[in-house]
Amino acid sequence: MLLFLLLGLGAGGVYALLALGLVLQFRSSGVINFAHGAVAMFVAYVFVRLRQYGELQMPWPLLPHQVQLSDTGLDTGLAFVLALLVAAVIGSLLFLLVFRPLREQPALARVAASVGVLLYLQATAVLNFGTDTATAPPVLPADTITVGDLNVPVDRFWLAGVSLIAACVLGVVFRFTRFGLATRAAAGNSRGAALIGLSADRIALVNWVAASLLAGLAGILILPISSLDPQSYSLFVIPALGVALLARFKFFTVAVAAGIALGVAQSMLIKVQIEWTWVPQNGLRDGLPFLVIVIAMTVLASGLPSRGDMTERHPGVGRPRRPIVTGAVWLVVGAVAMVVFTGSNRSSLITSLITTCICLSLVVLTGYVGQVSLLQMALVGIGGFSVAHAVGDWGLAFPLPLLAGAAASTAVGLVIAVPALRTRGVNLAVITLAAAAALYTLVFNSSWFGGGFGGLTIPNPTVAGYDLSPSGEGGAQIAFGIVVLLIVVLVGVFVGRLRSAPLGLVFLAVRGNERAAASIGIDVASVKFVAFGTSAFIAGLAGGLMAYQQQSLTPAGFAAFASVSVLAIAYVGGIGRISGAVLAGLLLAPAGLFSNLVNQQIELGKYQPLIAGLGLIIMAVDNPEGLAGLKPPGFVTAVKRLRARSLVTAPEQRMREVTR
């Protein structure tokens, strides 16, 4: 047990360093940065390239981004310094170009921007470095030290010591120096700080650079004990977020203690799994940060950041006037397109429809109720794998497996809603991202539910003996596509009617101000439960359709960052509007209709994640309403105003005059 305890000091030190950076960023600018792990990942890649090939890689693709400094690899010290300089550049660019313009924007815009940065850095790493795992010679000493009868790598002690020294330095700076006092003052009241000559932007910039340096340091130092790839390194942000939550995004020493404790606990779980074979072997260590985050949310909710902000602005919400008529029109148009399209175009249209259904689940939860969820693809996976079991194990006939999958997703969504009742905004995004990671490692990767590495297969659905073949040609695929179209249109009509129904108005009241809603008798907890359940049901329905379309599901399609990508396209489309979900499905789905049509002319496959990340950043900074909220040209606006005036009755006009 002592050996595993000491081995856990390394991972714990890395969690602590990342958490210190998260605390710095929040204390200086109020941002919880989901891309912090991706920064560590990119800087680690820069170090590896410098060390092995003498190449200096900058954080942008396509444009000139590579500088050949040597024909052979640089020495460790020089590569280390240059990589940290790149980390400082990344921190500066992130603050100046992305997060400074979002200082006064809603929390959802800041979450979306950090998600966009995450996708951008991952896509850039894939384009610049590839997807193969990378290694490099260690920076820290690689010797072992004897503790009793044990030989322990000395770098574990170095990692814990570096994090402890960093926390002490930050604690002294923030408590006893003018800069620390200025940071606290500027974060509390930027206008008041400006009146006494303090620049909140300059102070925040210094803190962002320091946070990125800590992320880069963590990414480089953990190279000897962790394989480097764009996905796994970015996931380090999840345990770091749990540690930062325990520190309430405020206390540096608590962050270090919690980080080291989490790393030690994960390491000791390995010993427990060896000794007790009945303990689950798959994903238990990766699920531990989720437990930490749940405890932090439940016990410390009243002291967590942003809890008191109940009146923040949200993206606009559309108000469908005739959803049934609109749905009927879309049903006819979609059916014609399903018949006219052939081959890959028809398949991509079906994919776009399923993506639209997933985005509609976010319209209900995030658009109508303001709950920022990074869990939707996990709920889609629950629905999809449940359909596979309903067909293969229980022998249910279509469409009963769809309902079974939707019911399973609803149950999971309601369970996740329990710890979410005491939080909202970015804190809810943290807990749902951790839940998505836990479901992926504990449930989807298990053989009993996800079928293991090979996944599960789903036979073609049949209706009254007629085979609906999603992958076939001709009438069978058309029939399946029309079934999908009908289900998605019905979901869209339901979401449209919900917007104007009494329950929809209650949703909007809770989104606008929870305390005000409670003061007029609205049960906020029950409303959140209903919203989570409704959203999960729609996501599970989409998962069942996806299972039937793909006919084979593997766990890889439902990793934690898949939910991040879904939030990205839903936000870019317009997360508060049904039209935004439709635009997201048609234009932004990775294998959707627009993507397929463009790929037939221009090969964009490997650039799609990069475009999605950039689009999300631009929308978050410049147009939080999304594509569906873009203002129409002047002539169209004038026509709409004239029409609106002509529809105003005399009593309404008099009431407007009195109000004015």
Image: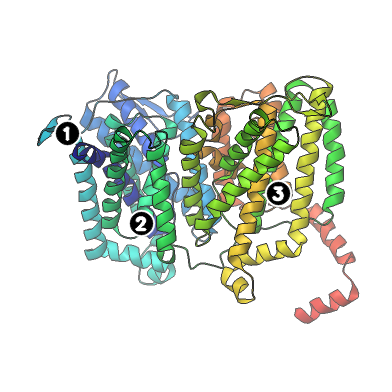
Q: Is residue 88 left or right of residue 128?
A: left
Q: Quadrant of residue 529?
A: bottom right
Pick whichever, 29 or 515, lies toward us. 515
Give the position of the N terminus as an image quadrant. top left
Question: From mark 3 to mark 2, how far is it between C-alphas?
Answer: 38 Å
Mark before the other along the chain sequence, 3 or 1 = 1
Question: Which residue is disc 1 drawn over?
Answer: 152
Tag 2: residue type?
A: Leu
Pick whichever, 173 or 147, lies toward us. 147
Decide: few, some or many residues near mark 3? Use Cα within 10 Å; few <14, some 14-19, many ≥20.
Answer: many
- Rendered residue at 32%/31% (across/down): 226
- Looking at the picture, how far across and down is residue 136, in whole percent? 28, 26
Decide: few, some or many residues near mark 2? Use Cα within 10 Å; few <14, some 14-19, many ≥20.
Answer: many
Q: Is residue 3 left or right of residue 465?
A: left
Q: Is residue 262 left or right of residue 610?
A: left
Decide: few, some or many residues near mark 1? Use Cα within 10 Å; few <14, some 14-19, many ≥20.
Answer: some
- Looking at the picture, how far across and down is residue 388, in whole percent? 64, 31
- Looking at the picture, how far across and down is residue 248, in whole percent? 37, 60
Q: Is residue 246 left or right of residue 527?
A: left
Dot label at residue 628: 3
Dot label at residue 461: none
Mark before the other along the chain sequence, 1 or 2 = 1
Mark before the other along the chain sequence, 3 or 2 = 2
- Rendered residue at 62%/42% (across/down): 569
Dot label at residue 246: 2
Q: Quadrant of residue 81?
A: top left
Question: From mark 3 to mark 1, how far is it between C-alphas?
Answer: 57 Å
